[in-house]
Image: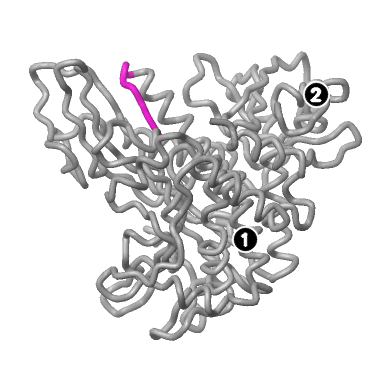
Amino acid sequence: MHTPVKTPERTRGKLRRPESNDTMDYPPINKLERLLGKPASAWAVEDLLRLCREQNIQMLSLMHVGGDGWLKTLDFVPQDETHFRNILAGGERADGSSLFGGSGIKVGASDILLRPRIESAFLDPFAECPVLVFLCGHYTRTGEPLPESPDTIVRCAAGRLKSVEGVDLYAHAEVEYYLGKRRDESDIYGTDDRGYHASSPFVFGEALRREALLLLAEIGVPIKYGHAEVGYVESGSQNDWLWEQHEIELALQPLPRAAESVVLTHWVLRNLAQQRDFQCSFAPVLVKGHAGSGMHFHLSPLVHGEFIAPIQDNKAPGDAARWLIGGLVKHGGTLMAFGNRADSSFLRLSQAKEAPNTVTWGRFDRRALVRLPIVARDEHGRQVTPQTIEFRLPDGSAHPHLLLAAIAQAMTGAKTLPDLDKLIAATAAEHGGRHRQMSTIPQSRAEIADRLHEDRRMLEAGDVFPSGMLDSLIESFQRP
């Protein structure tokens, strides 16, 4: 008998967070959940040890995110069962000054520990031999979470928001990217910036995108959907590469997992592109004048296990939504230090192609810094997905861990802003897209440095962002 797909429970007009599928009624997409017969939250070392015996897995890999936002890897071939257990229990040392250069870690005292998280395990889909991968956190020599680690920072920021305001903030990214291939006579593709939702055979990247969706789901990254995006760049006389844009929209997760999912999505897409002799680019602008690649983040506050709608029945935003919207518009320029890190970030924002360049928020305006997208409902008006608040400023150069941490910090501090209600009212987008403009976003790296300097106390609050890291970041944005 077919078991229906579980949908989020609705209580008093709000969507509750789906609980883990402990009964495994619906066949899990996560490959290890299928093999082990239990959800990731219930995995134990014994389960993974048994898996390695049954699947003849002889290599373990500890993957983690460095200061640059990229995945790093440390490989092991366990000598015996004791060695296997010790790797999972204690992890391994690494050079923190190399992984987090410029963050304040001294070379003379730079030993750190990588410690794996059991529930993060997955089988490497690109390895030539079976490899069991674990995502890791970073710890000091005394066993405390490493302050300079992006993983530590986003977990501390999410924890502080929960402790201070009682809010669990969930997020998911829209990962936009371009695929490039060499032009040949058989190509029958689209026209400039007209690729939205295009289907094969009029896009060449559909098969790659679909494979990416399945691989991501198998390694534990929840997916909302994928499609061809608007961007399309025809090959020219000096460049025989044809480029088309795609998007993978992820699903809502707690901030630390949402950040990891972005990094893993980039990793999967780059590997698949390399296998096909394609190029893959997340650059904010690939070619001037063409649609850029943003990385919008959708955010949904969870209070007492319920996703809180930003606005209900056309009323004013509720408390959690006010704090989030107010924090984003108040500190949007500062957040560019983590969400718009490339020189072409400014070009994307100035091209007037549905990218924000003023500090505004609105319910439908795609040019606003923050907007409230339409929510899916069935024919009876039942809401089937949580409503979200969309932050449209970041792009493909973003450091997702640090950006989401900074968003949580901005939301945590917004409640005490003396001008919160005035700020929200002054930056609301009016009907028809006309703005009562409060200010523009930074137009240069130097302006971002100034915003960082002004807002550093907000970022440092609760010892979330280390002061040495902010010093280095401000200095880097001040350089020409």
The quarter of the picture where the N terminus appears is bottom left
Above-or-below relation of 12 to 370: below
Above-or-below relation of 453 to 298: above
The secondary structure type at the circle numbered 1 is: helix
Figure colour scheme: one colour
The disc labelled 2 sits on which kind of residue? Arg
Residue 122 is tagged as none
Above-or-below relation of 61 to 444: above
The disc labelled 1 sits on which kind of residue? Ala
> Is disc 2 in contact with disc 1, using a CB cutoff of under 8 Å?
no
Question: In percent of the image, x 66 and y 55: which residue is there?
Answer: 455
Q: Report the label total.
A: 2
Residue 93 is tagged as 2
Image location (x, y in percent) of residue 13? 46, 81
Q: What residue is pinned by disc 1?
A: 410
The answer to whether residue 298 is seen in the rendering is: yes
Image depth: mark 2 or mark 1 in front:
1
Image location (x, y in percent) of residue 218? 47, 38
Front position in the image: 441 or 74: 441
Image location (x, y in percent) of residue 227? 28, 44
Q: Is residue 279 magenta?
A: yes
- The span shown in magenta is 276-282
Question: In percent of the image, x 65 and y 35: which residue is there?
Answer: 475
CA–CA distance between discs 2 and 1?
33 Å
